[in-house]
Amino acid sequence: MNILVTGGAGYIGSHTCVALIQKGHTVIVADNLCNSKIETIDKIKQITNKEVTFYQIDVTDAVAVDTIFSDNSIDGIIHFAGLKAIGESVQKPLEYYYINLVSTMVLSKACLKYGVKKIVFSSSATVYGNNTVPFVENMKLMPCTNPYGETKAMIERILTDIGKVNSDWSVALLRYFNPVGAHECGLIGEEPNGIPNNLMPYITKVAKGELNKLRIFGKDYPTVDGTGVRDYIHVMDLAEGHVAALNNLTEGVHIYNLGTGQGTSVLQLVNAFEEANDIEVPYEIVERRPGDIAVCYAGTSKAKTELGWTAKRDIVDMCRDAWRFEKGYED
Ligand code: NAD
Ligand code: WQD
């Protein structure tokens, strides 16, 4: 299939392009590079030894998006492009609502106009809020504490409503848990701007000596060791989950968790990283981070049964691959 990947130069998008190409698909990337680099496209080509068509456009630009659909015979889209920093979304709500929602509507209109019926969207486990674990797809969602999370819940609703009246559409709303790690070759990985907000990129910067020590947010949660528990998923497993969704989607709107089903605490992840890479990660315990929940992990049986997909890589793989990429990475 010819797949339009919006945000394909970004962290998850670039790994998904590799997975798609390796399964025989052709990718067309649309990205404005606001949070990524053009070099990543070259690296996707280098890893796969295949061409990638690249458009540097803003996906809220309906004219530019129309050009891509008229130039290419598109069979399906994966929509990764958007803004994703939770803290920034509180400061810049309009930008988040505008870019995340308008891009989805522009793309949906183009899909209707050009008869593209397969749509995969990057949602997030954040829509579950503070539900009881494991989070399963049919749970009632809770209001998010930030505009970023609200955009994900709203886009899920928008695509669900459009899907209802276009019964030949196949829509996958993929709720990612905590993507970490990098492609096994070390060429592509996560490249956050500035000081990372997320745990794994923070750990790798501390290990590299670019940051002094990790601050662990809270040790009084009702968890195995008092630190927060999350469902970390290797980014290549996540990427392969998208290929499985595209290949196995049936008509209708479907929600799937992409997680491992395993909870890992902050301290367990730090210890696993130190052991896997034989390197020390100094840390201190500080106050809880506002808005954090104690435990989050996925129920995984729906993706397994309906898409035939499960995550294969473990925490050690995630730690090794994240570190391999960081070691080879120059800012
Ligand atoms: P990323 O920032 O690395 O990738 C997003 C890409 O979209 C970037 O390359 C950026 O340049 C591009 N982009 C942003 N706005 C654009 C616009 N208006 N037009 C064109 N391109 C634009 O982020 P990521 O971690 O790869 O996340 C991809 C998607 O997955 C996002 O929608 C994010 O919300 C979602 N998601 C991410 C996580 C995570 O922890 N990384 C978890 C759940 C969901
Ligand atoms: C993981 C754990 C922290 C940093 C976020 C979004 C979610 C999704 C994935 C987009 C928590 C602890 C972290 C640090 C720490 N993104 N931590 N010190 O918050 O689970 O999920 O990214 O959709 O929506 O909310 O991920 O990596 O920030 O935190 O102790 O410096 O690590 O408290 O327990 P989170 P995270």
Image (spheres, rainbow, N blue to C red):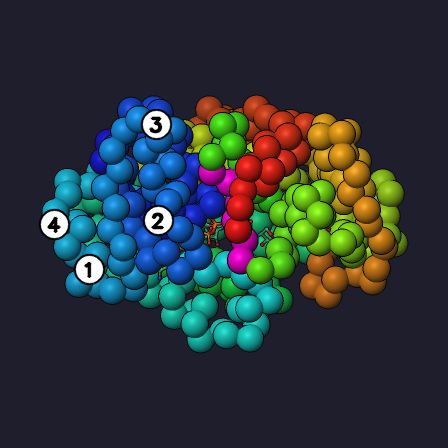
Q: Establish if 21 lies above or below 52.
A: above
Residue 110 screen position, x and y as percent: 20, 55
Would you identify the image quadrant in which residue 62 lies?
bottom left
| Apparent side of residue 196 relative to residue 35 in the rendered image (left or right) | right
Q: Which residues are magenta?
A: 188-193
Residue that appears at 40% across and 51% down: 37
Q: Disc 1 designates what residue?
A: 64
Disc 2 packing (10 Å; few <14; some 14–19; many ≥20): some
Q: Secondary structure at mark 2?
A: loop
Residue 296 screen position, x and y as percent: 68, 46
- Amino acid under label 1? Ala
Q: Nearer the viewer, residue 41 or 217?
A: 41
- Amino acid under label 4? Ser
Callout 2 touching callout 4 (CB < 8 Å): no
Q: Disc 3 designates what residue?
A: 48
Give the numbered dot on residue 70: 4
